[in-house]
Structure formats: structure tokens, C-alpha cells
Amino acid sequence: MTSAIRRFSTTTLAAVLVLGLLVTAGAPTAGAAERVVQFWTLMTQPERIEGMQRVIDHFQQTNPDIKVELTSVGWAEAHTKFMAAVAGGNPPDIAVESYGWPITYSEMGILQPVDDVIEAIGEENILPQDLKLNHYGGHYWGVPLYGTPSVLYYRKDIFDEKGLTPPRTWDELIETAKAVHDPDNDLYGFLVTGGAQELTNVMVWDFLSNNGATIFNENRPATEDDVTFNSPESIETFEYLKKLHEFSPPGSEMWGSSEYSQMFHTGRVAMVYDMMFGHARILTTAPEMKDKIGVAELPTGPSLGDRQGSFLYNTVGLMVFKDAQEPEAAKEFLKFLMKNDDVYVEWLLAYPFAMWPVTYSSQDKFFAAPELEEFPEHVKLGLDALPKGSVTAMYHGATPYWGEMEARATLAHVMQRILIDEWSVEDAVAEGEENIKEIVSEYAQ
Amino acid sequence: MVAGAVSQAFSSRSARRGWIGFALFLPSLLLMLGFLFYPFALNVYTSFFSKHLIRPRNKFVGFDNYVYLFDRKYFWLVIENEIIWTVFSVFFQVVLGLAVALLLNQKLRGINIARAFVILPWVTPVVITVLMWKWILNELYGIINHILMGLGLIDSAISFWSSPAMAMGTLIAINVWWGFPFMTIIFLAGLKSIDPHLYEAAKVDGASPWQQFIFVTLPGLKHFIAVAVLVRTIWIFTFFDLIWIATKGGPSYHTTLLPHLTYLQAFQSYHLGRAAAISVILILCLVLYLIVFFRVYRHEEQA
């Protein structure tokens, strides 16, 4: 009898516990958010992730009914991750994007326009090149978040020792590289790379755009006939890069960012083209190097003529997916981030020099920040450079093709053909143009 | 009459047993159909369509995807890479695996510890193996270049990844290092199965160690070598991670294999039709290999 009672009590207690757990698991807790926004960031540095989490915390304080869940997925294979998520019917609501991606994705029909967000921020308040790069087919597909200009980095200590000044033209650049180059003592003039990495894209576009070369003409929408890659200016540029490669360390044909950092930071390469993001990296990983590294505007090529020199402007933004679960809540978050200058500037400065403001209203606050005071030449260069920025394949405005060109490493392949396969520059550029045309024709199908 | 009743009972029992057998086999059959035959058939079917991962495009194009691939120079380079990569990797894994197996088959002190150690490369995850070797071979801070330069054997650092031949050679070397213990284990098991009396008889007949190896060891290992080569060839032919982590198929497609090309078409260009066509070609290559392999094997058996 006693054991029967004990068995009954135990069974009842267990049933009550299980039932309780089920009920509480399903019930909304007090103050819980009703709308959850999935936000995929590609940034991996703790400073930037923590900075964005602070923005989210600010936002959630004023919008308690919205919860923003931040996930860092990294830049590597980001396209693949997005495609897999979209194909699986479960994309994030918001995601970080790099230049050109929103246009590519809009062509695929997987994004929704963000015209209302741009309108709320104010078109007149956003830098023109950022607007231009996100506008396609009558809509905005990305909300510009920050830009990063690319510059010529040089080793001040080596330049001072040899009495050199930063070069302003390609002729001066090669002369300077020659003056520094001393391979017997493990010192190289300039770093020319061909690895299928962003560093190669930056370098190639920086040279092309400073020699009057473009990849597409101004016709929009661009067709195969509008591909202008195989031009005398392009050939001249790649010939120049081939010559400059003579002053580059052996093996650099396949290098990427890690080798570049290793060589430049240890003073074995005197000059390199990179985004100003590199300075942020120096400040966090090798602060003792900060006074040894100088920045200068990119030298210009012989065929630039009267055209204004340019540089790769790495504009990064945010996009909202078409199948987002909470698109309106997502857009509320974007408006909060971009309209609230205090919050926005605080985030930009979470990783100083990596991210430059894209709104005019935030510039005063940003450029007066104590974090930037120590490097006035960087600030001046950044301010002067920002209006001249352009991006690969989109000098004359947005095209949807860069995403795929980047994925297929089109420019890196041209470099590899020249530097590794020892093709003639003409053949390598011709193949590059054919590859670009193939991408364009595939879009037309 | 009795005989007829017995026969009927027997046949009904046999039929019942047949049905029970089929019922027990059915789950496996369904799993095979669902997880093997259906994806395979779908893949072949997709290869005849211009299908995009995201866009609602799904047009029948016949053999266009195959023609597109055959028209590309890089496709033939990839086929060439596959042959070089597979033949050299398997060959050197067999040679090294056999040599180490013969060594480990000796009765020496500490041989059991050596047997345990030799398996280490094989149990190391491929990611770690590749990253470790990338560090060791790095032209800036790698220990190999450091030692060679320290010994005065080279003037400047060797770039192991920049030239096509060097990159492929380096990858094969890493693959051999990583994969030879598998061969060693198989061959060691084979060596244990050879009757020691055969060696004694060979010695009595005055056979040298080399002749013992040729006329006793190798014939005794024939079946083991055949199985090892068969399995490793299929694995190595379809390798993805080792090369992808090391070179991403570069420079200029010189280390790209068919699985990488499938991945690039499917997830970087989003052309599922072309990716499926590459997979079909890969399968056909392996089927061709299996036909040739078994023909040769059967011929050897009959001989």
C-alpha cells in the first residue's frame, strides 16, 4: 500500500514537473521581444562586434518590442553562406554586404529595396558615391554603412634613411621602388600580388583607375558590348604592374593579407597599396609600428590625362532580404543606426581608421574625435580622398556583375596569367575581358 | 497425395520466408533508393538543365552544359591535374606505405611503439595537417626554408605555392605524408597473413632477400595492394579539403580538381546544371577506372 502510494506520488510529481516545463517553455516571458531580427555581420574583430552589440543595446532600450540577434559569419565564403540560407528559405533579415553585392543580389531577386530607409536618412545626407553604388533599376538595394579609402602605405623609417619622399606618379613610384630595393639584405621596393584575395582586387583597381582604365563604360544597363576592360590603358597598367613586380619579394604572386602584413610590418617591403583599414590593424596588432608607417595619395599613371585620379573605395553597407521574417523591424534598426549620429560615430570609432562615415551629418563629430587626433595626415588624406572614391567595375555607376567577378577572382586570374603562367599582357587582358563578357552574357539569359 | 501436401506446405513456407526476407530488406532498399539512387538520378537529370541556384531558371538545354565544359581550356587542365594528382599520390603512398610496413614487420625492440607512432599523420585532421605544412613551408617564416638557407643549400627562400608544378608537387607530398599510414596498416596486416614457411623454403632454395620480396612477399600482398589502390584512388580522385585549404585550386586552376570545379560552379557561379554535369563526368571517370581496374585484376587472377 505504502509503495503504491509512493509510486503514485512519484508519477504525479513527475507529470506535474514535465507539464510545468512544457507550459513555461511555451509561454512568453515578461518583457520578451515580440519581433526578432536576425542580423548577420561579416565582421570578425571583437572591437567591431562589441561595438555593434552596443548599438543593438541602445536600440533595444528604445524599442523593447524588437530583439536584434547578431551573428558573426565572417567574410570568408560569405556569398556561399547567403546563397545557402536563401536557397534554404531561411535568410537573415539584415546582413552586412560589400560593394556590388546588393546590386548582384537584387538582380537575383533575393533582396527588397531600402528606398524608405535612404529617404529617412536623407539622400542629401549621404556621400554621392555611396548612393550611386547602391542604386540600380530605380531602387536602392543597400544602406551604406561605412567607407574605407585605399592609400599608398610606405615605411617612413626606410624613406627617412634613404632621403626619399612619397611618389606622386608611376614613374616616381618605380624610381622609388628601385632606390629602396635591396634583395641581398631582404628588402623589397613594392608588393605586387596575384593571390585570389581582396588585396589583389584593391591593388589592381587602384592602378587601373589611376591610369584612366575602366571595366565598363557609362551605358546602363551594361551589356557585353559595354565591357571596356581590354583597352590600351588596361594593357599599359598590367605592363606596369609586371615591371613593378621585379621589385616585389619572390613568391608574392600568390600572397594575401597575412603575408603582406608580415613583410610590411617587419620592414622588408617598403611600399604597398592597401585600404586604410590597414592602419586600424596596425593600431590593434602592432601599435609600436604606428610612427614608422606613412600614408600618401595613390600615384597617377601616364594615361590618366585630365581625369581625376581615383582609388578603391571599399564601401560596406547593409541589405534587407526579400524573405526576411521581420523586414519592418529590420528597417527600424537601420534607420536608428544611421540617423543617430552619436550612436553611429561611436560604432565607427570602435575600430578607428577602418570605417569612415558615409553621412555628412556625422562627419564633424567623427573627425573631431580624440581617437584620430594623433594621425592628422591620415585624417586629411581620408577627407581629401573620400569624394574621389570609386569601386571596381563600377566607376561609371552600379552594375550587377562585380559580385560574380569577385567570386571568380577575375582580376587575380589576369595577374596570375601574367606573373605565373608568363602569358603576354595582351593575352591575359583579352582572356580577362572574355571572362567578364561571359558573366554579363550569363546574366542576360 | 501426401507428397503433394508436403510440397504445398513447403512451397508456402518458402514463399512466406521469401516475403519475410523481402520485408526485412525493404527498409535498406528504401534508404538506398532515397539516399543514393534518387540524388544520383536527380544529379544526372539536373545536368541537362540550365538551372541556377537562386534564379527561377530551369530550362532544358540537352548536352549544352557538357559542351560548355569541354570548350573550356581550364576544364582539360583540371582533368590533367586529376590524373597527375591521383597517380602520383597513390603511387608514392603505396611505395612509402609498403616500405614502412616491411620495416614495422621486423622483430625489433620498441616496434610496437613505432607502429603506434606511424599512424599519427593519418589520425591528424586534414585541416590541421594542411595548416601545419603551410607554416612549415612558408617562404617567410617556414622552418624548411630556414634550415635550407642556414645550411647554405639555397640562396633565397623557395616559394612552394607560386609555381604550378611546385604547388602540385607540394600538395602531392603533403597528401603522401598524410595518407601513407593507411597503406602501411593494410600492408602490415597482409604481411602477417603470409605463411612464414614460404620464406624458410625460399631461403633453403637460396633466394636472396630481394628475391624473397619479389617472389614471396609481393604475391602474398597482391590482393591487399589491389584493395588499397582501389580504395585510395577513389578517395584521392574525389579529394576536396586538402587542396582547397592550401591553394583554393590556384595558381590559375593548376591545382583545381573536379570536386573544386563542382563547388565553384555551384556555390560561386550558382550554375547548378553545370555543377551537376561536372559531377556526372567525375562519376563516369571513376566508373571507367573501375572497369579497367577489374579487367586488369581479373586478367592477373587468371594468369
Image (spheres, coloured by chain):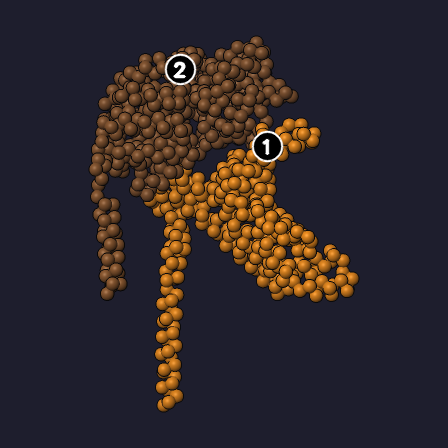
Chain colours: A brown, B orange
Res. A295 visible in picture = yes
Percent from the top left, x then y, of residue B224?
Answer: 60, 58
**Extreme residue toward the right, this view:** B206
Left/right of residue A318 with respect to residue B80 in the rendered view: left
Instruction: Report the side of B108 relative to A212 (left or right).
Output: right
Residue A338's x, y, as percent?
28, 23
Q: Position of residue A15 (x, y in %)?
A: 24, 54
Residue shown at 59%/34% (left/top)? Answer: B137
Q: Quadrant of residue A35?
A: top left
The residue indicated by pointer 1 is B142
In the rendered view, tell whether residue B283 sits above or below residue B159: below
* Closer to us: A433 or B90: B90
What is the number of the mark on residue A246?
Answer: none
Is residue B73 in sight in this rendering? no
Q: Secondary structure at mark 1?
A: loop
The answer to whether B20 is drawn above or below residue B240 in the figure is: below
Within the image, what quadrant is residue A59 found in? top left
Report in which chain the residue with disc 1 lies: B
Neighbor class of circle 2 (other Cα within 10 Å; few <14, some 14-19, many 20+) is some
Q: Position of residue B15 (x, y in %)?
A: 37, 75
- Number of residues whose C-alpha sits closer than 10 Å to that of mark 1, classed few (under 14), some (14–19) or many (20 or more): some
Q: Amino acid at mark 1?
A: Gly
| Residue name at image x 57 percent, y 60 percent | B295
Where does the C terminus of chain A fall, quadrant-wise?
top left
Which quadrant holds the N terminus of chain A?
A: bottom left
Q: What residue is rendered at 61% in x and 22% in y?
A: A186
Query: Distance between the Cα atoms at labels 2 and 1?
Result: 37 Å
Identify which amino acid the numbered label 2 is placed on. Answer: Leu
Asked where in the image residue A444 lies, by quadrant, the reply is top left
Q: Which residue is mark 2?
A: A372
Q: Nearer the viewer, residue A27 or B255?
A: A27
Nearest the camera: A341 or A27?
Answer: A27
